[in-house]
Structure formats: C-alpha cells, structure tokens
Image (spheres, rainbow, N blue to C red):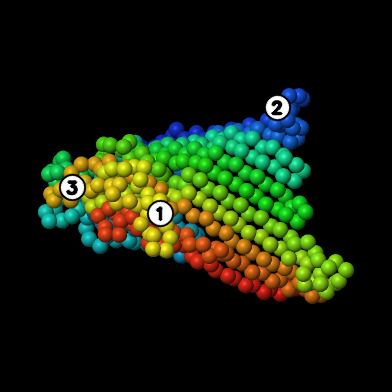
Amino acid sequence: MPQFEQLTRGTLGYNTDWNNVAPTIGVAWRPNVQRGWLRTLLGDPEQATLRGGYAVAYERQGMAVFTGVFGPNPGSTLSLTRSLSTGIIGPGESWPVLLREPNRLYNAPFPETPTFPIAIRPNRADSINAFHPDIEISSARTWTVGFQRALSRDMAMEIRYVGTRGVKFNLYRNFNDVDRVTGLRPNPNDITGPYLDNSGQSNYNSWQTSLRQHMTRGLLFNLHHTWGKALSYNGGDVAPGHIGDSRGDVQDFALVKLERALSTGDIMHYVAADWVYEVPGLFRNSRAAQRVLGGWQFSGIFRANSGPALGVTQTGGRPDILDIKNQVNKECCGFGRLQYLNPAAYRLVPVSSASSRTVRRGEANATPVRGPGNWNVDFSLGKNFPITEGKTLELKADLQNALNHTQYINVSTNLSGINFGQVNGTRTARVVQLQLRFAF
C-alpha cells in the first residue's frame, strides 16, 4: 500500500536545475560580388544581406507546475495570500506582507487536523499526482538562415529557413494504468494518477517567403507564405496536461515515442497578403469633386491555409487506418456535402469490457489527417472629409469575410459516433461595420 509523506519546510519537491545557459548568436553578412551570375543574383552590396542566428530560451513557470501537480493530491490545504490588503501590521511595519513573514500573515487554520501518511481507503476513488524529482526547465532551441534582397528602391524579397526544437517539455501520462484486456493494474495495491516528467519533445521546420513594397504610386502591399511542419509527442505545448495545445492522450506509459505526430494546430501552408491603395484624385480642376471623389483609401487582407491537424478517436482509444490515402472525402465540402472523413478508411478496434479500453493500440497516431483548408478576404474603404482647419469627418466601411465565403471548420472525429467525419461548424459569415467619426 503506497504511503505519502508531507512536504515540510526545507523539503524540495524537485531537484534544482542549474544547467540553464541561454546563448543567443546572430550573424549578418552583406556580400560584395563584382562579376558573374552571383553579381546578377546579389546585385550591389547595398541590395543583398545574408542573416543567420541561433538562440536558446527557457520556460520560467515558477511554482505553477509544482502547485498544479501537488496541489490536487488528497489531504488538507493551507492557503496563504499575499496582497497589499492582507496581513498584520504592527508598530514600525508597513505593507506589503510577504509569504516569508508567517508571523505577520493572518491565521489560516486547517478545517480539520491533518494526519500523515495518507493511505488508500476502501471504496474511495483517490487519485495521486506524481512528479519526477529530476524534472528540468523546458527549453526551445531556434535557428534560422535567411536571404534578403532589394528588388527596387521600394520593393524587397526575403526567404528564410526557420527551425525550432522543444527540449524536455512537460508531459503527462497515467501511471499504473489498467491492463487493456484484463482490467487489472500492474500494481494492484497502488492507485493511478497523472505522472509528470520531461519526456515531451517537439520539432518545427519551415520555409518562409516574403515580398514587401513600400507606398509607391499609391500602392503598398505585403505578401507572405509559410511552408512548415511541426511534430511532437503531446501536442507541442510546454504546459503540462490539458493546458494550451497539450494533448492528454498518451496511450501507453512506456511507449511515449510512438505518440510522435503532427502538433496541435499544425498547418502546412499559410498565405497572407495585405494591401493599401490610395485612389488617385479625379477632376483635379474641381475643388468640390476633389472633396467628394479624391482621397479614398482601399485596403484589404487575404488569408489562405491548408487544414489543421486532426485526431481520430473511438471509444476506449484510437482506431485502425485501412486506407491512409483516402481518409478525406474529396467531394466535401459544400451545401449537402458535409462528409469530410471517409468512414470506410478506418476500422474500430474491439473494446474490453473489463478495462473499457481497446484490447490493443490502434494503428492511427494522435493526428493522422488534416482538416478542411480555408481562405478569407477582408476589405476596408475609407476617406477623410476636411471641413475646416483642424476639423475632419472620417468615413470608413469594413467588410469582414467580404465575399461571404463559407469556411468549414470542426469535424466530428469519434469513429464510434453516428456523425463521424461530418463537418459541424463554419466561421462567421460576412460582417459589415460602418463608422462615422468627427475629429477636432
């Protein structure tokens, strides 16, 4: 029978991690080539720049992980609050009252007298959170190499490779989980609960391209494209458990590396463009016409992306994949055509009545398919009408999803459900906002 000891003053919940060196290195080089094809590619020394860099950054969660893991464990809790309005102020003392000054804190008695150690009690669903004592600070290593080239006085292009590797990320998984077939725990005298350590890893690689033009002849624009891929064991978030982008579905305690899959929200292609165009003045000889027809500004944003990573599940675990190339129904999506995933591409794995888990691991990983891609256009039209000196009337119209294009999201991914594979949501339809503002 497991025994749990109280953490007393001076007892470390986890060992101190001293190896947190975080260097940052950046290099820039402006080549000077006098002849040949490289001269054509690079241009004058002022037109091209090569850049590169490497950096290490650490996650500083403070006591958040410690309190989040140990806090829910069975037992009584003593809560102390530090604020400008809490605490005892004596002669010669002032605010604030700090947690390290227990003699100045208000009493916070236990609701009952705690007893230690805490033992498992019959007919009680106790759950214990476990914490690896050698847990270390999570870090991210980022590296990039890029090339920037001026194409004209007002236009520049940039291409770059960006990579990031997440190291020693927090990862939750259940210890002493029941056997898939028999429903028995490996240690029948122990309970189960979340176990936190540094098994999480992530990896991201991308190729990024940008084209920019400053305001020239009334036109300014930016065009960006990212082609990337992110892989991880638990979704890619540094936070533990079901926080942020983390996934809490590690199927087998000792087989963490089999969970490597597309990270939560991973998108392979993303294109974004924005522009501003100032309409040239018409009827320049007419002051009245200039006031009405001149000075209009037309701007917009275009976004398009491939589908985000999706996970496919079933009751008790994950299914098998029978046809990996035909998971997606190519006829989707549109009015009356909402079946996005092909049910025939998957097969349910039998579920044990003793454990309520699949009798074996399904062949599907955590995110074996991608959801529907989308594109959207936003427009804006505006003009300032001068009234008198220092007074202006501003008129503006914004159209979000200006073309009223249906953007399908949210796919039912539980193979055991009757709506498996169907799209069940869309993004917002067209929204028009009109603004009239008097500035003085």
Q: Residue at x 75, y 46 (%)?
A: 154
Q: How far apart in space, not on screen, are marks 1 and 2 (Cα)?
A: 47 Å
Q: Position of residue 435 (x, y in %)?
A: 64, 72
Q: Can I make out residue 437 in this image?
A: yes
Of callouts 3 and 1, which one flags the residue occurring earlier in the amino acid sequence?
1
The residue that disc 3 covers is 350
Would you call the spot at circle 3 few (<14 residues within 10 Å), some (14-19), or many (20 or more)? some
- Mark linked to residue 201: none
The residue type indicated by label 1 comes to Glu
Residue 38 disc label: 2
Closer to viewer: mark 3 or mark 1:
1
329 vs 136: above or below: below
What's under tag 3, amino acid-wise?
Pro
Who's the residue at 62% across and 48% down the image? Answer: 223
- Judge by depth and name the residue closer to the eye, 387 or 310: 310
Q: Quick one: SS at disc 3?
A: loop
Q: What is the quadrant of residue 440 in the picture?
A: bottom right
> Do we see residue 173 in this rendering?
no
Mark 2 burial class by Cα count in 10 Å: few <14, some 14-19, many 20+:
few
The front one of 179 and 267 is 267
Q: Residue at horizontal 77%, vertical 25%?
A: 34
Position of residue 179 in the picture relative to residue 433 (left or right): left
Classify mark 1: helix, strand or loop: loop
Q: Earlier in the sequence, mark 1 or mark 2?
A: 2
Q: CA distance from mark 2 to mark 3?
A: 63 Å
Q: Nearer the viewer, residue 368 or 231?
A: 368
Question: Measured from the top left, where is residue 51 in percent x and y?
Answer: 63, 34
Residue at numbered disc 1: 331
Q: Give the side of residue 73 with respect to residue 149, left or right.
A: left
